[in-house]
Amino acid sequence: MRVLLVGGGGREHALALGLAGDSSVEALIAAPGNPGIAAVAELREVNPTDPSAVAALAVEVGADLVVIGPEAPLVAGVADAVRAKGIPAFGPSAEAARLEGSKTFAKDVMLAAGVPTARAFTCTDAESAGRALDEFGPPYVVKNDGLAAGKGVVVTEDRATALEHAGECGRVVIEEYLAGPEVSLFVVTDGEAALPLLPAQDFKRVGDGDTGPNTGGMGAYAPLPWAPDGLVDEVMRDVVHPTLAEMRRRGTPFAGLLYVGLAITAAGPRVIEFNARFGDPETQVVLALLETPLAGLLHAAATGTLAAHPPLRWRDGAAVTVVVAADGYPAGPRTGDVITGADRPGVIHAGTARRAADGALLSAGGRVLCGTATGPDLAAARDAAYALVRGIELAGSHHRTDIAAAAVEGRIALPD
Ligand code: AMP
């Protein structure tokens, strides 16, 4: 199989490693890719959000499967354009990607499908935003209605801060605060059949102890030793299948990766958000544990044959990833600094570039690298991931020191 992978971040590096490790893949092409992906794929230039450019590249390279990593190309209709050329694409149509592209749309689908989630109002002016904030009380949750690269959400005790975010975004969803540990569940689906991957947890806040502003994600681990028994079955029954059925009923079936972000509240699992693609950095840990060949799985989802796919196989043990972020991230990351120590297995490239003059590795984004490791248990995986991070040198960089710590120490309590 010839596979074209679209994107160039840490998620795509993890996907590239999985795809390259599948013996059915005879050629892997990544566009635009990154210096880490270059070790396992041929890189091509493309504007990832230009549907006709990506489709033309898929034809040119003779792709049998196009895997679309980030959300922006999906919302732009890249999967539709690829499929219009008769090439299977892993990723939802633009219509179905609205589950991520519009928080209001996602809430509407959840309501119609009876999916448990926070009560919410969509607001477009200060007066209605103020009313919604007062309806729920603190902590206030204000979400930009459109795509915001995982950073459009403000959770705050301060009403003025909440109102200010609403004003900056224009159109927002204001919702009830959900208290409880968070779970990310990835589900591979062809629109009807659906296979859950291992649940993972990510760390959104920039600082240790969940302090500071939200980021794209500062680390992750899987599996979750503290997850309630039967969690995945419950979420498949109460969330995933009703949502897929509602999308089919609307004539816009969702095929690709449905990312279910959940809070495990006292009343049970509640959906925080849907995404239409693999999450970053949870992908790094989930795929590190997946033994089933990745290209075959994604091809089955892209061709409507997932019901015939064998059950997924997982490696024993656990995986941890720790993000190394640039100085100033998330507010204003500094780029262009030289990185050393990144040339080791397990170091995933998220925001890097090669200097043309001498090939030196440079920082080129807010989240620069991820140290990803597996181990026989969570403690061992955590130690190995931090050993990788300690070997990376990047001026001014920072990382959280508590990724997976509470889980290792048994400090995660489910609300009763
Ligand atoms: P989202 O982009 O919707 O995933 O939101 C980013 C982060 O904000 C989530 O991972 C949660 O930590 C937090 N968050 C979002 N919605 C809620 C909510 N209703 N209650 C509590 N925390 C939330």
Image (cartoon, helix red, strand yellow):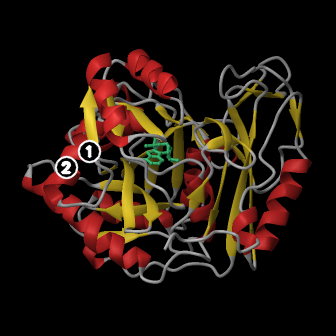
Q: Quadrant of the N terminus?
A: bottom left
Query: Where does the image place residue 413, in percent across and percent down from the top left?
Result: 60, 71
The answer to whether residue 414 is above or below residue 140 is: below
Q: Residue 48 carries which label?
A: none
Say what amino acid the circle numbered 2 marks. Answer: Val
Q: Residue at x 16, y 59 (%)?
A: 113
- Which residue is more in the foreground, 304 or 29? 304
Q: Within the image, what quadrant is residue 19 found in?
A: bottom right
Q: Which residue is drawn at 31% across and 23% down?
A: 171
In the image, taking residue 112 as reference, residue 120 lies left or right, namely right
Name the residue beneath numbered marker 2: 109
Q: Which mark is residue 106?
A: 1
Mark 2, secondary structure of its residue? helix
Q: Which residue is drawn at 73% across and 56% down?
A: 403
In the image, taking residue 83 as reference, residue 317 lies left or right, namely right
Say what amino acid the circle numbered 1 marks. Answer: Ala
- Which residue is more in the foreground, 199 or 69? 199
Query: Where does the image place residue 96, in percent across and percent down from the top left?
Result: 23, 44
Cβ–Cβ under 8 Å for marks 1 and 2? yes
Residue 57 appears in the rendering? no
Task: Please tell me how crowded label 1 is: few (under 14), some (14-19), or many (20+) other residues with Cα within 10 Å.
Answer: many
Residue 16 appears in the rendering? yes
Query: Where does the image place residue 408, in percent across and percent down from the top left?
Result: 74, 71
Q: Which residue is drawn at 41% across and 74% down?
A: 232
Label 1 within 8 A of ligand 1 by Cβ: no
